[in-house]
Amino acid sequence: MSTTTLQVVGFLLSIVGLAGCIAATGMDMWSTQDLYDNPVTSVFQYEGLWRSCVTQSSGFTECRPYFTILGLPAMLQAVRALMIVGIVLGAISLLVSIFALKCIRIGSMEDSAKANMTLTSGIMFIVSGLCAIAGVSVFANMLVTNFWMSTANMYTGMGGMVQTVQTRYTFGAALFVGWVAGGLTLIGGVMMCIACRGLAPEETNYKAVSYHASGHNVAYKTGGFKASTGFGSNTKNKKIYDGGARTEEDVQSHPSKYDYV
């Protein structure tokens, strides 16, 4: 899969996931009344993050918002905060990722800048998806705990033969929407992070190569002439070749490849 395709697919998945997170946060069916073994079927109750609703058998539905904040359970407030943080991060990363798309050119923006923006938006999408999944999971755990506690309290007296009418709540449709939306946002963020590697320009390493001229590299020893004696070696002026490694006599006896040029 090419880098552009990977980036666009991740971007589209993140948009769908963010829309699902917004829809799940605004839905009222986070918890629905458990109708199993419930003698009262004329009234159906369900609750969301912001209000609770009652639907009668006649089709009339009445919803009542939560008019308090401090009176709500701490877990419900934590779920609210997680969902809102996930939506805000998703919205910011959506704006950043629009400018980071490789198929969109804005001025003279370099590929390295697009790669950094893609990586940033991908990480923010991942965090947004994790917040949504964490919020829905916390609410589901709260429902499971309350369900089993309500089940244990339903049968009292006479060895558990007397059943008391008590409302139990189970998973609503908003929980499944939130799980799927958080997963899509998470997958989209991972794909954008992977696409970042293809957008970054490759670094080219150039090896230094030394070139030598094909002519004579001759250096002359300074200092003039010295008088020769019978005890010393012949100290007449000699040409120094190759930086002092060879003298003129050595060159004559052992010619190099440059002498034939």
Image (tube, rainbow, N blue to C red):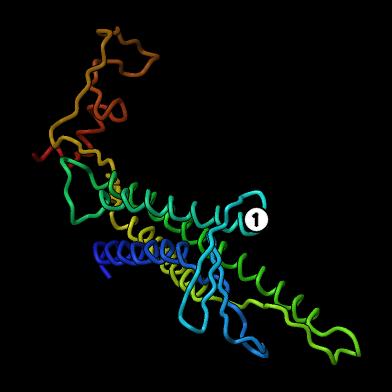
State whether residue 261 is above or below residue 217: below
Residue 61 higher or lower than 206, as above or below: below
Q: As displayed, is residue 33 above or below residue 13?
A: below
Q: Quadrant of residue 158?
A: bottom right
Instruction: Name the residue at the right extreme.
Output: 158
Residue at point 60% right, 78% down?
A: 33
Q: Amino acid at mark 1?
A: Leu
- Label count reads 1
Residue 122 shown left or right of residue 99 in the figure: right
Assign a secondary structure to mark 1: loop
Q: Position of residue 73 (x, y in %)?
A: 67, 57
The residue closer to the viewer here, 70 or 115, is: 70
Q: Is residue 143 left or right of residue 66?
A: right
Crowding around mark 1 (Cα neighbors within 10 Å: few <14, some 14 to 19, many 20+) is few
The residue under the point 30% across, 51% down is: 200
Quadrant placement of the N terminus: bottom left
In the displayed structure image, the side of residue 257 where residue 100 appears, left or right: right
> Residue sitting at 34 percent across and 47 percent down?
116
Q: Residue at x 37, y 52 (%)?
A: 91
Does residue 87 appear left or right of residue 167 in this picture? Answer: left
Residue corresponding to mark 1:
72
Where residue 17 sits: x, y (%)? Answer: 39, 65
Front residue (pair 96, 193): 96
Residue 65 in percent (x, y) is at 53, 59
